[in-house]
Every structure is written in C-alpha cells, then in structure tokens.
Amino acid sequence: MSADGLTYDTGALVAAERDDRMMWSLHRAALGRGLPPTVPAGVLAEGWRGGPQAKLSRLLKGCDVEDLTKARAIAVGVLAARAQHDDIVDVSVVEGALRRNHAVVTSNAGHIRKVAAAGGTGIMIHSV
C-alpha cells in the first residue's frame, strides 16, 4: 500500500506539541518529499487549546488546513452513517485521506480503520 501524502488527526497535533520524535520524523519526511501534510479544519479546532503552542504552531506552518465545505460535509455525513461512527472529526480525517490517497497519522488507529473499512478500503496508518 502506497500513499501520496499524510493527513493528521488530533492525536498527531497533540504528539507534535509534546515533541514526539516519531511525529516530527514523519512530518520532516513529508516536507522533504514536497508533500505538505493536510490538517482537516475540525482536527485543528479539536487540537488547538490556546496559546502559546509553539511546537504545534511550527508544525502547522508546513501543513495545508482543509476547510469543511458543504460538499465535504455531505460526504463526511454519508461516510459517518455508513460507518455508524458519530465522531465527525475522525470521519473527516478518513474521508479526506481516502479522497487524497493519504496515510493517516493518528493516536487512535482503531477508529480510523473502522471508518476506512466502511469506505470500502483499507488505509495506511502511522501511530503516534
């Protein structure tokens, strides 16, 4: 299984802020390949706890923050229903990662796998 980039969930942002070596290694590798990781807007909202968050702010400078548009919200809702999973942030991470062929960096691989399976496919996961 090969991925074209990385999508971060909230656990990835928390790991960056606590200076997790694996997280920063994955981030540097993605940037080195010219592939800025994606952070869904809901992930940023869930992970941001006020300032200063110097390490998280540094991480975000290298990322693309993806807005939750009407079309994406509908796609996330459809996948949430199919997965019978009510954590919309988890579902938005998977929906976007599947659409972009990204691996997911997460601290909750079980939820990500469950939602990806409902999307009809597996997904590459990096646990932090």
Image (cartoon, helix red, strand yellow):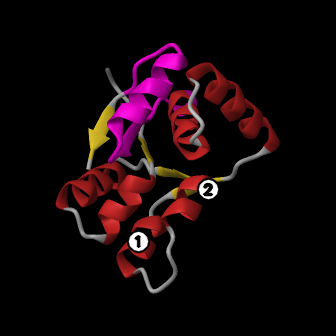
Residue type beneath disc 2:
Ala
Q: Residue furthest right?
A: 70
Residue 99's spot in the image, x, y percent? 57, 29
What element does badge 2 sit on?
Answer: helix
Residue pictured at 31% horizontal, 20% vertical: 1
- Asked if residue 65 lies in the magenta stretch, the reply is no
Bin the neighbour count of mark 2 within 10 Å (Cα to Cα): few under 14, some 14-19, many 20 and up.
some
The residue under the point 48% across, 64% down is 47
Left or right, 38 with reference to 75? left
x, y (%) of residue 10?
A: 44, 55
Q: Would residue 76 appear left or right of 114 to someone viewing this image?
A: right
> Amino acid under label 1?
Leu
In the rendered image, the vertical position of residue 87 relative to residue 49, given as above or below: above
Q: Earlier in the sequence, mark 1 or mark 2?
A: 2
Q: Which residue is painted at 61% across and 42% down in the image? A: 88
- Residue reaching furthest bottom? 52
Q: Indicate whether residue 106 is drawn in magenta.
A: yes
Whether pointer 1 and pointer 2 mark residues with C-beta atoms closer than 8 Å, the reply is no
| Marker disc for residue 56 | 1
Residue 95 in percent (x, y) is at 58, 32
Q: Which residues are magenta?
A: 99-123
Residue 110 point in image, percent of width and height = 35, 32
Q: Is residue 18 above or below residue 91?
A: below
Mark 2 highlights which residue? 41
